Amino acid sequence: MRICVFASGGGSNFKAILKAKSKGFITSGIPLLITNNSNCFATVIARKNGVSVVHISRSIYPELNEFDYANIFLKALDDYKIDTIILAGYMKMIEKPVIEKFRNRILNIHPALLPSFGGKGYYGLNVHKAVIEKGVKISGLTIHLVNENYDEGRILFQKAVKVKENDNEYTLQKRILKYEHKCYPIVIGLIEKNIIKIG
């Protein structure tokens, strides 16, 4: 595979994926990071690891219609011969033409056990805060394919994580994030070996 990572923030999952690649657990090429936030730390990680960075956001293309804006993404993906997209903390909905072209080739990781605590507005600390407020005893993470609706694509993998009595959203996030860093590279490796089938 030739992977493009989409990220908006700190890039910790992106870093974990690159680390797994450096150790040979992932064999795919990762030549490109696309971000909507040129100041995010994921761009620093990319440049330190020789990964090209392309910044695409409405802030720099405010005048483009949906079709032309999507084509900016598609051109970048085509230029780097990308066949698989990995979302790692990307905070925007993927453009529909990109989803159509990469159908069943876009992965996302979500910090809860979908379909619970998924959908618009459920991201980052918002998810963990909602879990704590509901008194849920088991949370976790989900790796799934991306479609046109938030967090509704086919589930590929889930990992349950116990919610402790003294947890708050920060402690729960920290613990689940450790599992994200382990599980995301494993799932990518299983897809490479065709043990988990996506295409």
Image: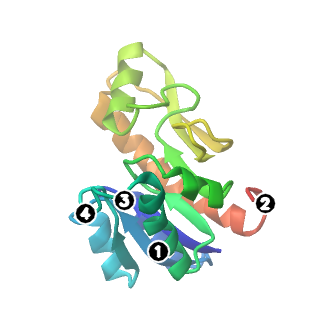
Image disc number at residue 195: 2
Question: Label 2 amino acid?
Answer: Ile
Q: Which residue is mark 1?
A: 76
Q: Vertically, is 11 above or below 150? A: below
**Mark toward the start of the polypeptide (3 vs 1):** 3
**Mark toward the start of the polypeptide (1 vs 2):** 1
**Mark toward the start of the polypeptide (2 vs 3):** 3
Q: Label 4, label 2: how many angstroms apart (C-alpha)?
A: 40 Å
Q: Label 4, label 1: how many angstroms apart (C-alpha)?
A: 15 Å
Is 182 positioned to the left or the right of 36 in the image?
right
Q: Which residue is mark 3?
A: 12
Q: Which residue is mark 4?
A: 60
Q: Position of residue 67 (x, y in %)?
A: 48, 57
Q: Secondary structure at mark 4?
A: loop
Q: Secondary structure at mark 3?
A: helix
* Residue at the image point whose x is 35% and y is 58% from the top: 64
Q: Label 2 neighbourhood size at 10 Å, few (<14), some (14-19), many (20+)?
A: few
* Residue at the image point whose x is 40% and y is 42% from the top: 175
Q: Secondary structure at mark 1?
A: helix
Question: Label 1 amino acid?
Answer: Ala
Q: Kindly indicate the quadrant of the structure image that contains residue 157.
A: top right
Q: Secondary structure at mark 2?
A: loop
Residue 104 in view of the camera: yes
Q: Label 1, label 2: how many angstroms apart (C-alpha)?
A: 29 Å
